Amino acid sequence: MKVLVIGSGGREHALCWKLKQSAKVSDIFAAPGSDGMAEDGVKVVDIAENDHDGLIRFAKEAGIGLTVVGPEAPLVSGVVDAFQADGLAIFGPTKAAATLEGSKQFAKEIMKKYSIPTAAYEAFTELAAAKAYVEKQGAPIVVKADGLAAGKGVVVAETKQEAIEALEHIMSARVFGDAGSAVVIEECLVGEELSLMAFVHGETVIPMVPVQDHKRAHDGDQGPNTGGMGAYSPVPHIEAHWVTAAEKTILRPMAKAMVKEGVPFTGILYAGLMMTEQGPKVIEFNARFGDPETQVVLPRLKTDLLHVIEQTMAGEEIELSWGAEACAGVVLASEGYPGSYPKGTPMNVPALDTDEQKWFHAGTKKTDSGWVTNGGRVILLSSLGKNLDAALEKTYAALNVHDWDGLFYRSDIGSRAVTLSSRKK
């Protein structure tokens, strides 16, 4: 089978890399793809991810058997509906189902209707009313742009003033454009964060292993929210019964709820969770693979990824096989990210001497003189190890021996998990 992956980031690089390992796959194409993917033998196609007509035309001409959508934007704009209208196989939610990520208010309303545990909230379209709510509720409090904001539209405000400033940035200054035409303001949940993704088709739900992401830009969970600065799996300090509870009270009920609402979900259902004293609660839902979570989950997956997708779409809840190793990934980002940052900074991508490590390119470009930066999150180094401590040690050992002029990375990814899990022992 010929497979097309839509997207160009680190998540899509990981998807291409994993799909390419399938004995069922003859050729992997990526649109628009990246130079990093091309280095791995992926056939890069110069078609924008939002060019539905161009993507469909290519899929027909190239004889693509399955298309897999990486990013959220083409899902929310209806690329799945367009492919299906032309009789093409594609893995991802329809435009209506992708509203689960495209509108936080929509997601909250469904969770409320079907008693799926989440933070208390109110939604607003008027700045004055939103400010008045913050004044009444106090802080800490969470302010979220309703629409898509590349993982950066959430502010955990420690003071009322921070919350008011966030509202002004989102609703008045429109730093996230139309995504800020409405906001959701939530209670601040306390506990351990966890990401749990699942392959879903209607009421068919096949959960993946849990993963923990680091959203803040700097060490000690300081600085602004980013799209993610690193991740690891498994999450040793989160006990298995919590993950089972999340599957039973959140993932499966949401899949059923979408069917009942007449917008059945197909694709990757991603639950961003907080493990509170009352049990798992939803922070947010996403409608696709997480980034950088994908880059540490897929290296652990032993089952053929194409087979998993095919079985999911056939409504078969198969058992996934996972490696016993842990996987840790650390992002190198351009100085200034998630704010403004330069592009075109020369960088070295050192060769790796083991199959247990992998560079996943997110914002790089290959020039005649070598690699240069071409984005905010530039590249991620993923490492497998016998346990989380070993995986992190291998990742940082490779990163720390090089100078990364113009780039930065967090030096504490997973460190708290290692401490907490060692205490449990």
Image: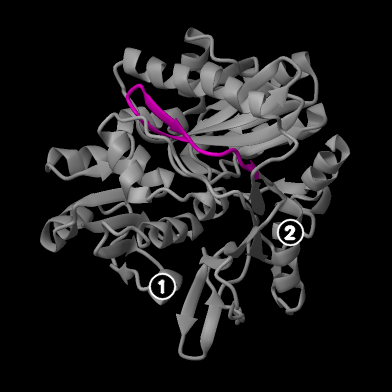
Label 2: how many residues lie within 10 Å, few (<14), some (14-19) or many (20+)? some
Q: Going by the image, does 40 lie left or right of 329?
A: left
| Residue drawn at the location 51% of the way across and 27% of the way down | 104
Image label count: 2
Dot 1: what SS?
Answer: loop
Instruction: Say whether residue 190 is magenta.
Output: no
> Foreground residue, 113 or 196?
196
> Foreground residue, 378 or 162?
378
| Residue drawn at the location 33% of the way across and 12% of the way down | 260
- Splitting the image into 4 quarters, where does residue 234 fall? top right
In this view, 412 is above or below 195: below
Q: Position of residue 264 (x, y in %)?
A: 31, 23
Q: Position of residue 56 (x, y in %)?
A: 18, 52
Does residue 402 show up?
Answer: yes
Q: Provide the residue span drawn in magenta.
A: 198-212
Nearest to the eye among marks 1 and 2: give it.
2
Disc assigned to residue 390 = 2
Query: What's under tag 1, amino acid-wise?
Result: Asp
Give the residue number, with chain letter if any, for mark 1: 40
In this view, 212 is above or below 241: below
| Residue drawn at the location 40% of the way across and 22% of the way down | 255
Which is nearer the N-term, disc 1 or disc 2?
1
Q: Going by the image, does 402 lie left or right of 356?
A: right
Q: Residue furthest bottom?
A: 369
Does residue 261 show up?
Answer: no
- Splitting the image into 4 quarters, where does residue 278 fall? top right
- In 3D space, how far apart are the residues under numbered discs 1 and 2 (Cα atoms)? 26 Å
